[in-house]
Amino acid sequence: MRFRWVGTVLLSAAAYYVYLPLPSAVSEPWKLMLLDALFRGFMHVGDVAHALGVCHRVHLLNRVVSWVEVIEPHSCPTVQVSDSALGGLPVRVFQPTGGGKLKRGILYFHGGGWALCSGRMRSYDLLCRKMAEDLDAVIMSVDYRLAPEVVFPDQYYDALAASRAFLSVDVLERYSIHPERVCISGDSAGGNLAAAVAQELGSDDSLTIKFKAQALIYPVLQALDFYTASYQQNQAVPILYRPVMARFWLQYLGADASLEPLLLANNHSSLDQPHISPETRSKLDWSSLLPAKHRKHFRPVVKATGSPGVVSTVPGLMDVRAAPLLAERGALGRTPRAYVMTCEFDVLRDDGLMYAKHLRDAGVAVTSDHYDDGFHGCMVFAFLPMRSRVGRRSMENYIRWLDQNL
């Protein structure tokens, strides 16, 4: 009887920890709850270890990821997989085994808030393997350096170095990649890096070979407004909570973690900040940039007075290499055709929707692929035991777009 009572208590406690009220429209909510409970558990352990001075919370999380997810390269009859280097950075290369013709080429940057994960994780390994097989394409998944040891702009420079090397004649010839069928892609923070690099290289007239497409998967693109409609709607929806995104931004920009409450209150972007011009504000005015179905009943939160000096202390907040949404129309117009995936239940939804509109207004051909039942990270989780239907669907549509546009 005592063991039964203890078991009941433990099961009740576990259910209480796992259960989270979610929007009814989200795809397979119990799978998302279980996934979120796992993440929250590791994050809580990391926070405790950080507070006790055992190790940085990010280091613990990455150790767990490495233990659970990072795998050695293994080939199969259709795809040869190997670890190599590109622009001085580690990459995992996926090559179709069939020869005889030039292949398409895709350079991929993983997500993880510029601080977590690896292109050698099982999830990314399987994604890139499927892309290589379905598209008959060479895929290179980049392991750029991570925060907190490395902060902006070094991750950007890593992505830029890998991209320049990828587009070089030597690399394209070595891997039999067609120079007119190359794409840059990434998810979340990796989508941020892909967008920033696409802007830089699109405006570089010295390049003889350029990317022909950019595919951005629920990208993070700005840190001036933490009260967009999607930040308000999804602030408590897993797996990317609003405070966690603010923490990732501060870590990436090498800023003091104590600024998190200021960012979450939009004090850093108040109207009395002299470094933020009306033109800059117009680029993320979601009340005019988003259609009504995404604005819903939400209202902008713009403070008249805030915390002076935040933008000058953290200049990366205004740097287009960190916040591609702030780019000028001329720079956007020189980027390649674009695919932008967004998910309804994602704090970053409006970043992607606004960017797609800016690209379209600049004359870029854009495919905006939105999932009404999607959540942040769903495409990468398409291969996990808790994979969701929307994850599989979004991955299939992403690969289909690449097949039709590259």
Image (spheres, rainbow, N blue to C red):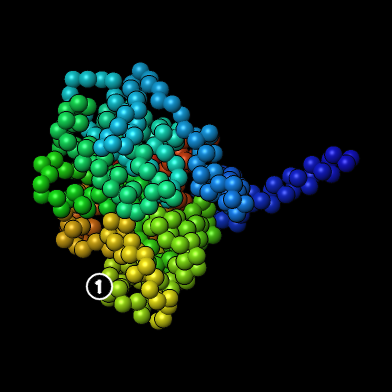
Q: Position of residue 183 (x, y in %)?
A: 24, 41
Q: Position of residue 216 (x, y in %)?
A: 32, 48
Residue that badge 1 annotates: 279
Residue 233 visible in the shown view: no
Q: Quadrant of the N terminus?
A: top right
Circle 1 packing at 10 Å, graded few (<14), some (14-19), many (20+), is: few
Q: Name the one closer to the observer, 391 or 226.
A: 226
- SS at mark 1? helix
**Amino acid type of the residue that numbered disc 1 sits on in the rendered structure:** Glu
Q: Name the one closer to the observer, 363 or 240.
A: 240
Residue shown at 29% from the left, 45% from the top: 159
Residue shown at 28% from the left, 67% from the top: 283
The image shows residue 246, relative to residue 270, as above or below, that is above
Q: Quadrant of the C terminus?
A: top left
Looking at this rendering, what residue extends furthest in the front direction? 53
Q: Position of residue 53 (x, y in %)?
A: 59, 50
Q: Name the one closer to the observer, 250 or 368.
A: 250
Tell me if 217 is positioned left or right of 242 in this view: left
The image shows residue 248, relative to residue 301, as above or below, that is above
Residue 379 visible in the shown view: yes
Residue shown at 10% from the left, 41% from the top: 208
Looking at this rendering, what residue extends furthest in the right direction? 1
Tell me if 187 is positioned left or right of 329 in this view: right
The image shows residue 298, relative to residue 82, as above or below, that is below
Looking at this rendering, what residue extends furthest in the top direction? 77
Q: Position of residue 73 (x, y in %)?
A: 40, 25
Residue shown at 32% from the left, 67% from the top: 284
Q: Name the one closer to the observer, 197 or 80.
A: 197
> Which quadrant would residue 138 be assigned to in this image?
top left
How many marks the image carries: the answer is 1
